[in-house]
Amino acid sequence: MNHVLFEIESNLEIWELIDMNFDFIFIHKFNPHEIIEWWKTDLKINLENELQDVEVRNMVFDIRTSLKKLQEILKLESNQLTIYQFDKPISNTLIIENLPQSNLESILKENGLKHRIDINFEVVQISSFDIQFIERIKEHKLFKLKITNWNNRFGDKPNA
């Protein structure tokens, strides 16, 4: 994969970089409440079962959604997000943590992965199999300077 790494002010900036050609979004290990504390909620387990008024913490789950919902999720300003953009729906049986690291990228590519966006607080790494996608980001009016500033300070050493 090709990578680009830079700082962002807000997750909402990411929206401008999303490839609108691919509507199949997968967010891996989403944590809707990043503060480790108890909070009250209702949990819908399945169509027949719901736990009402329970206290939970450390909830982490995968989300399979669309571009429209991704925009709503970005507004939550979560500190850490891993967003995968696919050209088709992700299979029910594809579990990223069960994939061998040595073949991870190739298996995800076979399953339709186009881009991955890793947000870690104010740092974002965008990875793509499409070098033109990465080059467009590098030339983007807003992000071009951020990328240049990042490379001047830290060098271009993205996490693979």
Image (cartoon, rainbow, N blue to C red):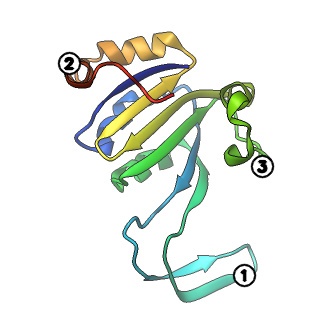
Relative to 5, is 58 above or below?
Answer: below
Residue 64: image location, x then y, percent? 62, 49
Decide: few, some or many residues near mark 3? Use Cα within 10 Å; few <14, some 14-19, many ≥20.
few
Q: Is residue 58 found left or right of 103 in the rendered image?
A: left
| Residue, disc 3 | 92
Tell me which amino acid carries mark 3.
Answer: Asn
List the residue tagged with mark 2.
152
Residue 149: image location, x then y, percent: 19, 22
SS at circle 2:
helix
Front-lying residue, 47 or 36: 36
Query: How would you rate the neighbour count of disc 2 (Cα within 10 Å): few for under 14, some for 14-19, many for 20 or more?
Result: few
As drawn, is 88 to the left or to the right of 14?
Answer: right
The image shows residue 154, relative to residue 61, as above or below, that is: above
The residue sitting at 45% across, 38% down in the picture is: 118
Label 1: which residue? 49
Q: From the viewer's perspective, is residue 56 above or below residue 4?
A: below
Residue at 52% in and 32% down: 116
Tell me which label, 1 or 2, sits earlier in the chain.
1
Q: Which residue is drawn at 38% across and 13% down?
A: 136
Residue 33, position as x, y percentages in the image:
42, 67
Distance between the alpha carbons at the discs numbered 3 and 2: 42 Å
Asked where in the image residue 46 lies, by quadrant, the reply is bottom right
Where is residue 29 drawn, in percent x and y?
A: 56, 54
